[in-house]
Image (spheres, rainbow, N blue to C red):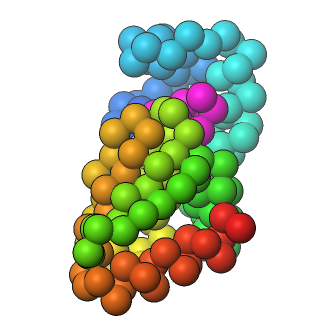
Amino acid sequence: MKVNRHVKIVELVNKYDIETQEELADRLREEGFQITQATVSRDIRDLKLTKVATDDGRQKYVVLKATENALRDKYIRILKDGFVSMDMAMNILVIKTVSGMAMAVAAAIDEMRWNEVVGCIAGDDTIMCAIRTMEDTAVVMDKIRKIVL
C-alpha cells in the first residue's frame, strides 16, 4: 500500500544516507516492496523529498519538514483511509482498520499527540490504544468519530 510504502521511505531516508532513486528502490525491495523506478520517482515527489549536501560533499535525500497543518492533514487522511470500526474495553480502545493499515493509523494517532492516549500497539488490521482513563476513552472515540464520519 502507498501509505505503508511512504512510511517506510521516510524511515529509510532518516536512517541511511540515500543518494539516488535506484538506491532507495533497492532498499525498498530489501524491505519486501515490489516497486518500479517510476513509483519511486512519484513517491519522492509526493513526500517532497529533497537532496542536501552531506559533510563529505556527497548528497542524500531528506524529508522537508512540513508545516504543522500539512502534517495534521496527512494524519487525518491516513486515519480516514484506514479506519473501519472501534470499540472500548475499559481504558483500552480497540480500532479495526483496513488490512495492512493498522501501523500507519496507529502512527497517525500517536502523532496527533492527544493527551488522553498513552500509546498504541498495532498488528495488521487491529490497534490497541492504551488510554489514561475510561472517561478519556470516550473522549478519544468522539475525536476519532469527528474525523472519520
- Quadrant of res 123: top left
Q: Main secondary structure of the magenta part?
A: helix
53 or 81: nearer the eye?
81
Q: Where residue 4 sits: x, y (%)?
A: 52, 35
Please give the name of the residue rendered at 72% of the width and 40% of the height, measured from the top-left corner.
Answer: 46
Above-or-below relation of 80 to 29? below
Please give the name of the residue rendered at 54% of the width and 80% of the height, measured from the top-left corner.
Answer: 142
- Along the horizontal axis of the image, is 85 left or right of 122? right
Asked if residue 63 is among those painted magenta in the image, a careful observer would answer no
- Along the horizontal axis of the image, is 79 left or right of 41? left
Please give the name of the residue rendered at 42% of the width and 75% of the height, measured from the top-left corner.
Answer: 113
Q: Where residue 109 sits: x, y (%)?
A: 46, 63
Count of marks, rendered view = 0
**Residue 56 in view here:** no
Q: Quadrant of the C terminus?
A: bottom right
Q: Where residue 86 sits: x, y (%)?
A: 47, 60
Q: Quadrant of the N terminus?
A: top right
27 or 57: nearer the eye?
27
The magenta stretch is 1-10
- Along the horizontal axis of the image, is 51 left or right of 115? right
5 or 146: nearer the eye?
146
48 or 86: nearer the eye?
86
**Residue 94 in view here:** yes
Above-or-below relation of 115 to 54? below
Q: Residue furthest bottom?
A: 135
Q: Where residue 81 sits: x, y (%)?
A: 66, 49
Above-or-below relation of 126 to 134? above
Above-or-below relation of 28 to 107? above
